[in-house]
Amino acid sequence: MSNAQPKEFDVVIAGAGMVGASLACLLAESSLSIALVDRKRLVQGKDSDSPKLHSDKFDPRVSAISQASQQLFRQLGVWEDMSAARVCNYSAMQVWDAEGTGSIDFSAEQINQPELGSIVENSIIIAALHKRVAQLENVFSITPFSIESFEQVEDEDGLIVKLNADDGQAIRAPLIIAADGANSKLRALANFECREWDYEQHALVTTVRTQLPHNNTALQRFMETGPLAFLPLRSATEDDAQHFCSIVWSMLPDQAERVMSLSEDEFNSELAAALESKLGAIEWSDKRFVFPLRQRHALDYVKEGIVLVGDAAHTIHPLAGQGVNLGLLDAKALAEELQRGIQAGRSVADPKVLLRYQRRRKGNNLSMMWLMEGFKRLFGQQDLSIRWLRNIGMNAVDKMTPIKNQLIRKAMGLDS
Ligand SMILES: Cc1cc2nc3c(=O)[nH]c(=O)nc-3n(C[C@H](O)[C@H](O)[C@H](O)COP(=O)(O)OP(=O)(O)OC[C@H]3O[C@@H](n4cnc5c(N)ncnc54)[C@H](O)[C@@H]3O)c2cc1C
């Protein structure tokens, strides 16, 4: 933080990840002064640069971005930069049960849309958002500032929340928005109660080159130990354009330990077999990373002067690629409610305004979380009769066009 920067703001957003940075861009449309704080420096780029343009290396972390999130990025003026850098639109998705014949095919055509969604590398999303943040006059980035503690102090204008960094620096605002991710320090410091449980699964992620083209189709095979997803990527080279995928392979923790220790050749053949060789051989794979999976949901999103958004409020199994999409819907709803409150002459930390945000988002997030939990339990079943019913059910849903279309629209964020 430089000496020239103010230390008092209307709103502090803690966390400049995909959700916090999007929220800063949304709130910049108001007259509020906003501090965007992160323990890491924001991604710097010249004004004319598109993020990560023409880079040959794929980020191992990618997100399946729904149409609703894409619309939000368009509204913020960042989608063009992301598309110029690299996005892969996918128009179909195949989901099948490893234990039987059950399968469902989704296609954009079925619901008269050009695509189901887009796969975008997280670093590209963040770079585009940070570039936009740097152009906004009422958003002050305060980095690297690692939040270590906070205190609530009585001020002549009411309650003020003061955030302290590890080096003793402090900033103040009547409203602090915690967008500091799954292990939110602010959530813990403010004693927000959470319901949480371990999925007893780890997600292994990496990038692979496949023998056969992906045809802009996302693939997901459900196994008893967890789902395996192949998410199509777009390569800059014409010959290779459809041969790269990002994979998210959820598995039991001891299985993850074993798979992480395999040589590249061993890993590639196990992976090809796990996908039933649908894309032929795996010809190359990048460095592997593993993430323990936990489901977590805060019982409340709002306390005096503090609001939770994104992964700070809820973390969800990545099997349907919904985590950041839900977080972006939180950001949109909170920005709308704050702006509505300001227009009605209310203060930014007015509990009525903040509770309206909580009411709009909590039920929606919870229903998605229960759906993911249901999938996880259903496919973890060893009971033969349940497996049989599951396969029949999948094939039945596949044939029920209205239900299938409703599922697609929900996943695309078109029906929230
Ligand atoms: C394997 C995997 C695959 C996934 N795939 C998808 C997908 O396809 N689609 C999808 O929608 N979602 C997906 N998700 C979920 C998605 O990645 C998260 O929902 C998303 O990253 C959450 O964004 P966020 O901005 O809320 O938090 P984060 O991305 O965690 O950002 C938090 C920010 O806060 C900062 N911060 C943290 N602590 C402090 C502190 N004390 N002081 C200052 N700053 C701090 C961090 O530096 C960071 O910049 C996936 C998740 C996993 C694990």
Image (cartoon, rainbow, N blue to C red):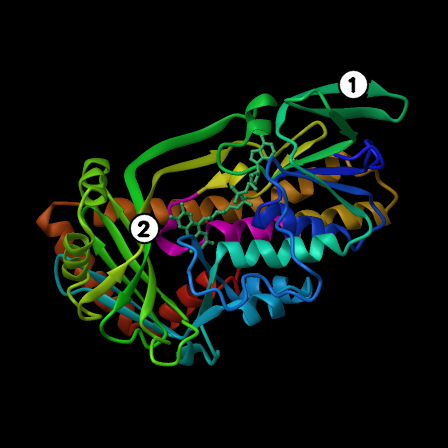
Foreground: disc 1 or disc 2: 2
The numbered disc on residue 7 is none
Residue 279 lies in what quarter of the image? Answer: bottom left
Please give the residue where the numbered disc 2 appears in the rendered image.
Answer: 287
Q: Residue at x 65, y 57 (%)?
A: 45
User: In the image shown, does 301 or 84 lie closer to the viewer?
Assistant: 84
Badge 1: few (under 14), some or many (20 or more) residues near its Cα, within 10 Å?
few
Residue bearing mark 1: 153
The answer to whether 392 appears left or right of 334 in the picture is left
Q: Of residues 258 and 263, which is closer to you in this image?
A: 263
Question: Where is residue 32 shown, x and y percent of the image?
Answer: 83, 45
Dot 2 falls on a residue whose secondary structure is: loop
Q: For the residue marked with disc 2, what is the amino acid? A: Lys
| Image: magenta residue range | 316-332
The reply, left or right, for residue 338 in relation to residue 186 is: right
Tag 1: amino acid: Val
Q: Nearer the viewer, residue 322 or 50?
A: 50
299 on left or right of 387? right
The image shows residue 15 at horizontal and vertical percentages of 61, 39
**Residue 318 highlighted magenta (yes or no):** yes
Mark 1 C-beta closer than 8 Å to ligand 1:
no
Q: Position of residue 307 (x, y in %)?
A: 65, 35
Q: Residue furthest left?
A: 384
Q: Element at badge 1?
A: strand
- Which residue is painted at 43% across and 56% down in the image? 59
In the rendered structure, are the residues bearing label 1 and label 2 in contact, judged by CB atoms less than 8 Å apart?
Answer: no
Q: Quadrant of the N terminus?
A: top right
Q: Is residue 271 above or below residue 186?
A: below
